[in-house]
Image: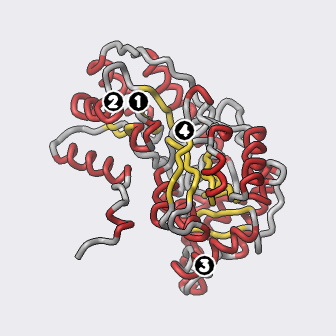
Amino acid sequence: MQEARRIRELPPYLFARIEKKIAEARERGVDIISLGIGDPDMPTPAHVIDKLVAEAHNPENHRYPTSEGLLAFRQAVADWYRRLYDVDLDPRREVVTLIGSKEGIAHISLCYVDPGDINLVPDPGYPVYNIGTLLAGGESYFMPLTAANGFLPDLGAIPSDVARRAKLMFINYPNNPTGAVADLKFFQEVVEFARSYDLIVCHDAAYSEITYDGYRAPSFLQAPGAKEVGIEFNSVSKPYNMTGWRLGWACGRADVIEALARIKSNIDSGAFQAVQYAGIAALTGPQESLAEVRRVYQERRDIIVDGFNSLGWHLEKPKATFYVWAPVPRGYTSAGFAEMVLEKAGVIITPGNGYGNYGEGYFRIALTISKERMQEAIERLRRCLGKVEF
């Protein structure tokens, strides 16, 4: 039997392909150093694990959870926003619990997109923005993120007829894959754009707490009027090393949150309550582990940037995320360069074209392995490449 068109047209997920390449190389006996997938290698804080263990023993948490999430967890999210950003959220109406922010990002298009509708999607960008659009039957209009514009979308370059048809705009700062950051002035411009064209902004803030050199990333919801036009996604995955726990949230405009909660109520039964209690411990408990996470990633960032610059690159140190976005040397495509360094150096990097057409000519490095393995990767590349030219 033929698969549904939505599945036939769905591209293979980028990181699934990378995991397959890693497995194949390891089967050949290659000692692989993976700078590919952004999955934190540091442990979840002990007090968070202890809370999970305690709550897992509570029979009350063994039953179906509510799809919108525990009010106590949503209150912890609201308190976190007030403490970090001075943003007020009603935990009952303006916060919904997600099984990781990826789940909400994938489902939000089902709330607003009919076949033939348009979403505005960054390119390069996290693949799920486009995938969620396709699964809802919509079309993506790709907003180029270029170095010349600081990897911010040029809102003025979006054709007015496209903007009038658009339902959602996805933005993501601090940005995956480029590591770029945005200020409140840009967010205010997004708010005004959304008002002009009656569209909903979906800001992915997954890397909001992974920042360096004293920089603090703003929340989209800090921009005046932001709660009138959009929502923000975030999670405990990156700041608290909880990617496998699958716990996040969306917050902001109340009717959008309600629509997403309604979709969820018909698709899943919510996040395991013991995990939500652990999430409360992460958001409200000691934050020393987050300071250590930032310190470790900053040290690794410096090793990677300094190391690649010693090989001929001219990279600046990103202010946020645990990624470094780098151009490929002269004579290579993104995929060609990634395949070459895998074959000759046993090093995995993520080809930039996996994030969209405007990612061609770049590759992404993830800072989620030990500094010793990073240093070894640099030396392997030095032996493999020598001095590169651009």
**Mark 4 to mark 1 CA distance (whole Å):** 14 Å
Helix, strand, or loop for circle 4? strand
The residue that label 4 is drawn on is 144
Q: Residues within 10 Å of mark 4 (few under 14, many from 20)?
A: many
Q: SS class of the residue under badge 3?
A: loop
Give the x, y percent position of residue 112.
Answer: 61, 68
Tell me the mark number nearer the camera, choosing from 4 and 2. 4
Q: Earlier in the sequence, mark 1 or mark 2?
A: 2
Side (left or right) of 30 relative to 359: left
Distance CA(mark 4)–CA(mark 2): 18 Å
What residue is rendered at 52% in x and 30% in y? Answer: 301
Q: Is residue 340 left or right of residue 72?
A: left
| Residue 365 position within the rendered picture, expressed as x and y whole percent measured from the top left | 44, 35
Q: Earlier in the sequence, mark 4 or mark 2?
A: 4
Residue type pointed to by label 4:
Pro
Q: Do callouts 1 and 2 mark residues in contact (Cβ within 8 Å)? A: yes
Question: Which x, y percent locates residue 208?
Answer: 65, 46
Query: How far across and how far down the image is residue 63, in percent?
Result: 55, 86
